[in-house]
Amino acid sequence: MKDTTFEEQALKTAKPSDFMKIRRPYEFSDSGNRAVQFISKDVFEYKLATITERSQEKEFEFFCRHLAEKELCPNLIYQTGPTGGGDSKVDTETYPVADKISLKWFEGIGREANQERWAFAISAKAQWRPKIKSDVAGIVSTNRAYKLIYFMTNQSVSDRKRAEVEDSLKNEFDIEVRILDKTWLVNKVYDNERFDLAASSLGLDINKSEFKLGRNDSIKTDDLQALEKEIDDFDETNSSYFELIENCLYSAILSRELEKPKFEVVGRFERALHIARERKLSNCLNKVLYQYAWTSYWWHDDANKLSSLYDELEKSVIDSNSVWELEKLATLWITLQTAFIHSHLNKEQAKLKIRYSNLTAKLQLIADDKSRPNASLTAITELSFLGMSKSMMLKEPLDSWFEKLIYVLNASELMMDVPVNKIIRYVDELCDLLDEYPKFDELFDVATEISSNRVSNSQKGCMLIKNAFRNMRLDKNFKALIQLGEASRLLAQKENRDDFILAQVGIGQAYENIGLNWSARNGYVTALYKLINDFDETSQLPPITIRVLNKIIWTEVKSGRVPVVFFWMQLKSILIDKLCNSYNNSAEEEEAQLLDAILGIMILKSSYKDLSKLETLPSFIDECGLAVSWVAALYILGYEDVIKAEIKEMGNLEELCIGWINQPANSDLPP
C-alpha cells in the first residue's frame, strides 16, 4: 500500500483533553464549579490607559514589578525613593542568586537572570518614545554592566515601532532593550490568570465564582504544597538531585491534575527538565520528557509541543539498549499518530514514517537478542502495539500482531519484567473496537486465563511468604526455603516485584540461619539486582536497598571474602547518595562502626604469605571511610610511622592490636 495511505487519512474529533478527561477523570480536577476569577477586559484596559489621570503611577510600577517577577525573573530588588528611578536610574533590577536557588524557579523565563544584571524602567507617560530613550541613556550612564533593559509601558506599541526603537537603541547604546507594552501586560494577566495581582496592585474589583474544593483536589493540593516546600528546602549536601528531580516532576504532574494554569504546569516541567539536563541524569531526563510530552497533548492540546519533545526523547534513547526507555518513545509515537489522524498535525509535522522506521529498527534488534529474554519479549510487545496501531489506521489485517502477543503471553510465565498487564489492558480495550477476528478471540482467551492465574498466584505467593517467615521464627528453615522458592515462582511478575524481592530476602535469611552463607548471599544479591534494576525505570530506591546490601556485606564477611566487602562498600556509598535522607542515618552509622571493627580483626588475622597482596589495601579502605580497618591494614603492612603521624595519641600499637584481635567476636569469624 502507498505511503500516502499510511499518513494521509485524517479524521476530525474533539480536543484531546476532552477525550482524556472522559477516559481518566481521576487524573483531572474534581472540584465543583471550578474557581473563576475575572476582571472585565474593557475595564482593565481602561484602567491601564488612565493611570496618569488617576495619579496611579506608583501603583502601576508596583503592578509591573510583580508581573515581571512572575513572568520574567523572580529576583528583583525593590527600589526606594522618588518615582522614575531616582538616583539609581532604574525602577527595579535583578540581584545575583546562587545556581542552586535559580534551579528551583518554575515561574519566569529568564533563569540566566540569576547571574546577569537586568534593569527595568517603568513608565505610564503617553509620550513613550522620548521617555524610553532618556531612561536607557540614564541606565547606561551608571556603568553597572547591565546586559538587558526592559521598558514597561501602559501605551500600545505596534510591532513595527517596537522593532524599530529596539534596534535604534541597540545601535546607539550597545545594549539589548525590550519593550513590554499594554498588549503584553493584558495578555499576561488574561492568559496566565494574574487577576489577583492586577486587582491588588491597581485597586480593581474582581469577580469570583462559587468554588467547592473536591476531595481528590484537596489531597493533591496538600501534596503539592508539601512538595514545593521540599524543593525549596533542597540542600545538595544531604539530598540527591535524583530526589529533587523526582519531586519537581511529581509537582508538575500534580499541578496538571489540579488543572492549574498552563504556564504554571509548563513552568514546573521546564524546571525538572532544566535540572535533569544540568546534572546530565539521562534516566531522569527521559522520564521528564515523556511526561511533559504526554501532558502537552492530552492536557494542553498542544500537538506541536508533543512533536518537538518526541524529537528530544528520541535523540536521548534511540541508541539505548534499554527497552523500557524505548517503550516511552513507542507510547508517544502512537500519540503522534492519533494527533495526525485527528488533524492536529499534518504529514510533515508528524513525521510518522521516519520515526516509525527508526524506532522499530531499534526494537527489532532487542527482540532478536534471545540472551535477554525479558527485554526481547518486551520489545516484541512494543513492536506489536506499534504495528497494530499502524495497521488499524491503514485498515490492514491484524492477525499477525495478535499471534505475536499470544506468543509473548505464553512465553512470559516466569519473566518478571515483561509487561503482561499492559497486554491484558490492551486486549480489554480492543473488545470495544474490533469486529470479527478469530485470532483475537484466541488472544482474548489466553489473556483472560493468564489474568486469572496471575491474581490467584499473587494471593498464593503472598500467603506462602507469610507462612515461611513464621516457620523461620520456629527454626523450620528448610520448610521455609521450600515455601519461599514456590512463592518466588508464583510472584515472578512485574506487578508483584515488591513481594518477589521480599521472598528473595527471606531465602537469604533462611540460608543464613542454617549457616549456608554463599547460598544466602545469592538470595540477597537477587533481591538487590531487582531493586537496582527498578531504579533504571523509576529513578527511585526504597530504603530496604541499604538493608539488603548490608546483608550481602555480612555474608561476605562470614565467608572470609574481605576484598569483595570493599567493593560492596563502594556500591553502598553510591546508593546512599541516591537515597539521601530516606534511610536511618544513626542506625547506619552504628552498622558501619561495627563492620569497621570486625574487618579490622580479619585484616590483622591475615597470613604472612598474603601480605604482598595487601599493599594497595590501605588506600582502598580509606576511600570507603573505614578508619579502624585502615589502621589495621597499615599496622600489618609495617607502616606504624604513618599511623603515628596521622594519630598523635595512639599509644602502644602492638598492645592495642593484640587486644583487638583477642576480642570475643574473633571466635565467630572465619580463620
Image (spheres, helix red, strand yellow):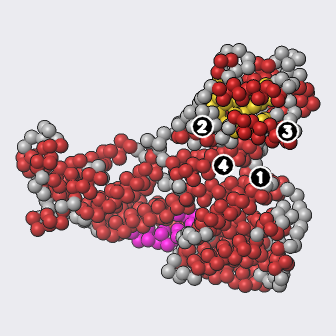
The residue lying toward the viewer, choosing from 636 and 118, is 118
Which residue is at a point 61% across and 57% down the rendered structure image?
Answer: 287
Q: CA distance from mark 3 to mark 4?
A: 35 Å
Q: Earlier in the sequence, mark 3 or mark 4?
A: 3
Dots 2, 3 in contact, CB < 8 A: no
Circle nearer the viewer, 1 or 4: 4
Q: Secondary structure at mark 3?
A: helix
Q: Main secondary structure of the magenta part?
A: helix
Residue named by callout 3: 161
Q: Position of residue 601 (x, y in %)?
A: 17, 54
Query: Compared with residue 467, is residue 542 higher up or lower down, i.e. above or below?
Result: above
Q: Position of residue 139 (x, y in %)?
A: 67, 27
Q: Amino acid at mark 1?
A: Trp
Q: Amino acid at mark 3?
A: Lys
The residue lying toward the viewer, choosing from 506 and 344, is 344
Residue named by callout 4: 269
Residue range highlighted in magenta: 480-497
